[in-house]
Image (cartoon, rainbow, N blue to C red):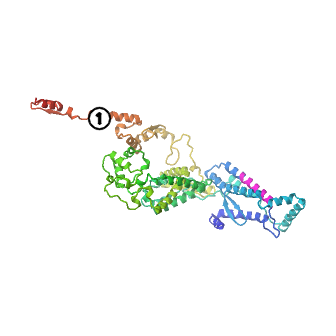
Amino acid sequence: MKIGYIANKPIEERALMLSWLQQRENEISVKYYKGSDPIMETVLEQQRRYHEERERLINELTKEMLYNGVTHKEKLNSEFRVRLMYDVSFTFFVPTALLQRYLELTRELRDLYDDKDGMRKMDIQALSGPNEFNEFYDRLKQVKDFHRKHPDEICVPMSTEFEKYKEMREKPEEANATLIEFSDEEGYGRFLDLHDIYKKYLNVKGVPRIDYLTYISFFDRLYDIARDKKGIAYKTYLEDLLAYLEDFLSRARPIVDLDEETKDALAKFETEWAQGTFPGWGREAAPALSHGGAHLDLTAFTTWEELASLGLDRLKSALLALGLKCGGTLEERAKRLWSTKGKALEELPAEMFVTKQRATKGFAKTAAWGHMPAALSEKHRQVAVLEARIYRLSELLKEIREATIENVQRRQARVGFERDEDDADADKAGNADGSGNAGGDDEEDDIPYNPKNLPLGWDGKPIPYWLYKLHGLNMYYSCEICGNVTYRGPKAFQQHFSEWRHAHGMRCLGIPNTIHFAHVTKIEDALALWQRIRTMKESERWRPDVEEELEDNSGNVVSRKTYEDLKRQGLL
């Protein structure tokens, strides 16, 4: 296992590991098993050595924590050095964390001080007894005899082991500073590279077809996918996505305790699963998710009035997906669909269905959470566990994902030769600092100097200030109807009145989004204007009893009301 670990590393790192291993073996051989008269460490010497190593570990950890790298690569390498240290024992070579090594030494010291085997007590008695000088000279004689037999032995001091960390901090360009392997797209841990995972997502049957940029924003919204679409291919896709996210997090965030985060995510999942509140798998979501078609997740709605804001067509498709009647007014459809929330189809009245025969065949036709077959429930639970772990990792990678979206948008805005020039510059910068990685710390890839907070142009740099003033981007407009969203510049503000967000806000208020409400951003103003328009239209509406005119036999033109009165009196 240990040899395989070394073999899987790059050749430069393997050479560094083996060189260091040889030095440590030389030191261990001097201390433990060289020559015919082996020199065994006493318990007191072991305690001294453990104390020294603990102090050096604390000192090294403190320096790494206080170290503030100039570039992103130096900061990430510093975190990686905090995480990694190579612990060499008699016959094995394993990577372990500095903190783990510190805790291991602490446990060893505690066991030595407990002195369960009595060896420490015997050493103390030998050095403090009546023959302490004889004991001292006997041990001194053993040391001299050993070095007389092995005059060329080299003993590497412990301080040498920690010198390489100091060299990496002070001279990163001379040391082998590329400690972690990243792809060109990942930019040495700054961006996600989900292209391969995105291709696997497109091969899953029944999931929405979206572009790569949209996928980066919504890959963790697994609760939007219908439950009956989460089959074997979907589970395989989740396993690949989870494997990549865990691998990337271990490289881009070396200090994060991945095992602890996984344990917390599973504990939270067990609680939500037992309560039936896990996203996409809750009891409330069962009626909508148990059928294919244009399903609708009712967990996002609290009243039937919110459902009514979706419109007639959306409610019709949701009712058809459940096999229910889809006729009637907007209010009737919303109430009919709302009545299915949290209920099994078997609990609904027969008159709500298109036919009075209810489908009871298979799990896809049952909506009750409690009646799920045990085997099928366990399969779905395994999928839900993967989703829970992905949710947790997506939270930890939130900032990196936002940076990835900006990077993809910036690259898509450039033409082909510009992207080639950027890649060439990145390669050139990477070779200059010895890394050879396109994701090197090029100054152009760092955050640009932008004290006025100007918008970024197609090249990823702030636009000119005169252009910023010309388009009025220094002016901000807030719309209360859109949920107090702020729009930058008059052009964006003008366009938003015809966009979905403003139309949805008007629909929630029960007001049509017509030209009459242009430039109206306050809810109170919109309601007042709508009431005024309704009053005006009411007054302009044609009233037959007053405005309809009739002609009698003599040719006199009178209103309908007057005509009816004269007719009842027999005057016509």
Q: Tell me which corner region of the image, top left, top right, bottom left or bottom right, holds residue 366.
A: bottom left
Which quarter of the figure is the C terminus placed in? top left
Q: Position of residue 368 (x, y in %)?
A: 42, 55
Q: Is residue 88 left or right of residue 223?
A: right
Q: Is residue 545 visible?
A: yes
Residue 53 counted in the magenta span: yes
Mark 1 residue element? helix
Q: Residues within 10 Å of mark 1 (few under 14, many from 20)?
A: few
Residue 493's place in the image compared with 216, above or below, is above
**Range drawn in magenta:** 42-58
Q: Is residue 30 left or right of residue 315?
A: right
Q: Position of residue 247 (x, y in %)?
A: 57, 58
Most prominent secondary structure in the magenta stretch? helix
Residue 419 counted in the magenta span: no
**Residue marked by disc 1:** 537
Q: Position of residue 37 (x, y in %)?
A: 83, 68
Q: Is residue 429 visible?
A: no
